[in-house]
Image (cartoon, rainbow, N blue to C red):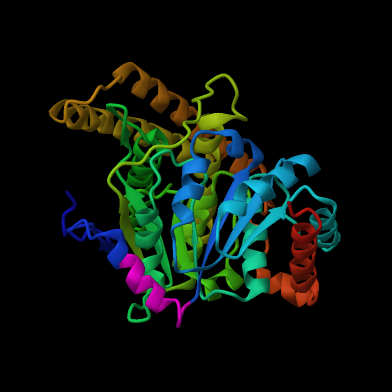
Amino acid sequence: MGDFYQNGIITTLHNLTRRPVDDLEQELVSFSRVRPMSLVLPSLYSELQGPALKNIVHELAKVPYLAEIVIGLDRANEQEYRHALEYFSELPQHVKVLWNDGPRLRAIDLKLREQGLAPTEMGKGRNVWYCFGYVLASGKSKSVALHDCDILTYSRDLLARLIYPVANPAFNYMFCKGYYARVADGSINGRVSRLLVTPLIRALKKVCGPSDFLDYLDSFRYPLAGEFSLRTDVINDLRIPSDWGLEVGVLSEMKRNYATNRLCQVDIADTYDHKHQDLSAEDASQGLSKMSTDISKALFRKLATNGEVLSNEKFRTIKATYYRIALDFIETYQSDAVINGLSFDRHKEEKSVELFAQNVMRAGSYFLDNPMDTPFIPSWSRVASALPDLMQEMYDAVEADNREFAP
């Protein structure tokens, strides 16, 4: 059961009454006349063969208020793109699938690359960025929600609660972050958020001193949630990281561009489970190891832009402080698990913290060794300034792909 406690400096919208989804959707239908809504789904082709996406599609087929669903498809050849169009044809809404590996969108990418404006890394950030560009080009919505395609416990009330704060014309929110309890199969999940992000934020507060930005990040109950919604206008000036720092990067951008009273978080699910990443202790370029490094780099870059001076000595202090705080958190989570009758593998938790501590130092070294690193993809307002016709060209390319390869 959710509570009504407000912590931190952003508004928290709780799930106090388990309001029926039909009631929420009835309101959202009325809101859609003033604020049409879109949904963005970044997807790998492999997720079409996974256990989660088919249920997500079945649930979305019942949603009555969406003007548009935009699916970004990565790692798909022509045959797989054709299959994806057929796969998503069950949806009754206006649906467009971006074939990111197709010749038309690759030509768009090449044009951006020639101007130094293209995303430099493959991954979710790049996929989301192109989907957002298409949403701007289509002009069909004033509010946009985004969620992942690997949610095993998905139901359509997740989307309704996620998009409601930015769709309701009586609300003033420009951005909303979803949160939920990461408990499934009798154990507490969400290791990177529990054992890296929150302890690292607390360590940075202790080492670097008071910070509005760190207080802001610490206000989010699940800062790494892949589910968020925003007003379409926000997209123009949003700079998206191309690596695993996407979620932290988006939160940083919202703090930079808007007052905190325009931002909120909402409880979107009682239970939430999705595809779990391996810890990947032996390979720093994969799994939670890469994720923890990218997130740490994103935090350090943001602190530097706020005027924090970082050095090898300070990173060693941050690592030591983080490690002690993270171990204390393990004690806390073990108590929480025991009182709720959940299993808790302390050895596994401590191994995760040891790896994350190494990656805090690895991220610090990378930050110091690459002072000219530009991890953000340029904003769409910059793209429009440099290439005024590109958004229309991208819209036409997506329309042509969907028309040519339609089942």
- State the image coordinates of residue 116 (x, y, percent, origin top left): 80, 60
- SS assignment for the magenta stretch, majority: helix
> What percent of the width, then of the height, locates residue 5?
16, 58
Specify whether residue 114 is painted magenta. Answer: no
Query: Which segment did they paint magenta?
Result: 24-35
Number of on-image labels: 0
Where 266 falls versus 346 (above or below)?
below
Residue at image position (60%, 44%) is 367
Residue 74 place in picture, x, y as percent: 69, 45
The vertical placement of 170 against 401, above or below, is: below
Pick the residue in front: 379 or 318.
Answer: 379
**Residue closest to the far top:** 347
- In the shown orientation, is residue 380 left or right of residue 187? right
Residue at horizontal 78 percent and vertical 40 percent from the top: 79
Q: Where is residue 222 drawn, in percent x and y?
A: 36, 48
Q: Along the line of sight, which residue is nearer the eye, 345 or 82?
A: 82
Q: Residue at x 23, y 60 (%)?
A: 19
> Can you see residue 263?
no
The residue closer to the viewer here, 112 or 44, is: 44
Q: Is residue 82 left or right of residue 252?
A: right
Q: Quadrant of residue 134?
A: bottom right
